[in-house]
Image (tube, rainbow, N blue to C red):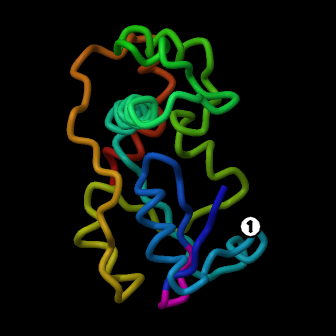
């Protein structure tokens, strides 16, 4: 898990498929990555939550893009055949629920307890509360798959979908 400190002093949890590269870019420019201990002690602890099914679809696009650019999968990652189709990817997700790219966001942050939650989809209007620098839009996926998410997989995300809807 990674955490970054904004120029206002707030600590932001950086979660894969929730603007991770964008957060790292803007927060690393000032060398502001912090430890879990420092993150927990911060008076303002922020987490942006992405709509869970959009995040899952983003994970699929991420792996499709990686394999289009290079042929060597990293250990613990889906193999090219696992992302050949959306259905194959759903089977892989079903068999490998703990991958950080699709494990529920509220689980990924581990011991970090945010005291401010925002929808990632609203970052354009909320980011300025925490940092004066513009939030970069990196690694945007445009070709999201439109297939269904099987019910057993979808239900894994219902608790965080309820949190997201309540924001």
Q: Quadrant of the N terminus?
A: bottom right
Question: Of 54 and 166, which appears nearest the observer?
Answer: 54
Kindly identify the residue that appears in the image at 61 percent across and 28 percent down: 77
- Vertical order, 145 against 50 (above or below): above
Residue 165 among those drawn in magenta: no
Using the image, determine if residue 19 lies above or below residue 53: below
Considering the whole magenta stretch, tell me its main secondary structure.
loop
Instruction: For residue 158, say whether it is visible.
Output: no
User: Which residue matches tag 1?
Assistant: 36
**Residue 27 falls left or right of residue 40:** left
Residue depicted at 30% across the width and 80% down the height:
134
Quarter placement of the C terminus: bottom left
Q: Which residue is farthest right?
A: 37
Q: Residue at x 32, y 37 (%)?
A: 54
- Is the residue 98 above or below the residue 148 in the image? below
Residue 26 at what x, y percent from top left?
A: 44, 76
Quarter of the figure with residue 3: bottom right
Range shown magenta: 7-11
- Is residue 111 among what the camera can see? yes
**Whole-percent x, y for residue 119 in the image:** 34, 56
Classed neighbour count for the residue bearing mark 1: other residues with Cα under 10 Å, few (<14), some (14–19), many (≥20):
some
For mark 1, give the secondary structure: helix
Side of 125 relative to 66 (left or right)? left
Q: 1 and 60: which one is in front? A: 60
Q: In this view, does 116 lie to the left or right of 124?
A: right
Left or right of 28? Residue 52 is left
Look at 45% across and 29% down and name the residue there: 67
Q: Picture coordinates of residue 129 (x, y %)?
A: 35, 82
């Amino acid at each position: 898990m990674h955490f970054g400190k904004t120029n206002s002093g707030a600590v932001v949890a950086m979660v894969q498929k929730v603007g991770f590269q964008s957060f790292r870019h803007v927060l690393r420019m000032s060398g502001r990555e912090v430890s879990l201990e420092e993150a927990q002690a911060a008076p303002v602890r922020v987490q942006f939550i992405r709509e869970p099914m959009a995040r899952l679809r983003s994970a699929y696009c991420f792996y499709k893009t990686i394999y289009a650019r290079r042929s060597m999968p990293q250990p613990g990652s889906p193999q090219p055949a696992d992302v050949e189709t959306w259905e194959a990817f759903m089977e892989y997700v079903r068999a490998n629920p703990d991958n950080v790219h699709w494990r529920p966001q509220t689980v990924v942050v581990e011991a970090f307890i945010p005291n401010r939650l925002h929808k990632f989809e609203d970052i354009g209007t909320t980011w300025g509360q925490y940092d004066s620098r513009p939030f970069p839009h990196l690694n945007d996926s445009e070709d999201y798959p439109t297939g269904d998410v099987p019910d057993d997989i979808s239900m894994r995300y219902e608790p965080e979908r309820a949190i997201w809807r309540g924001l």
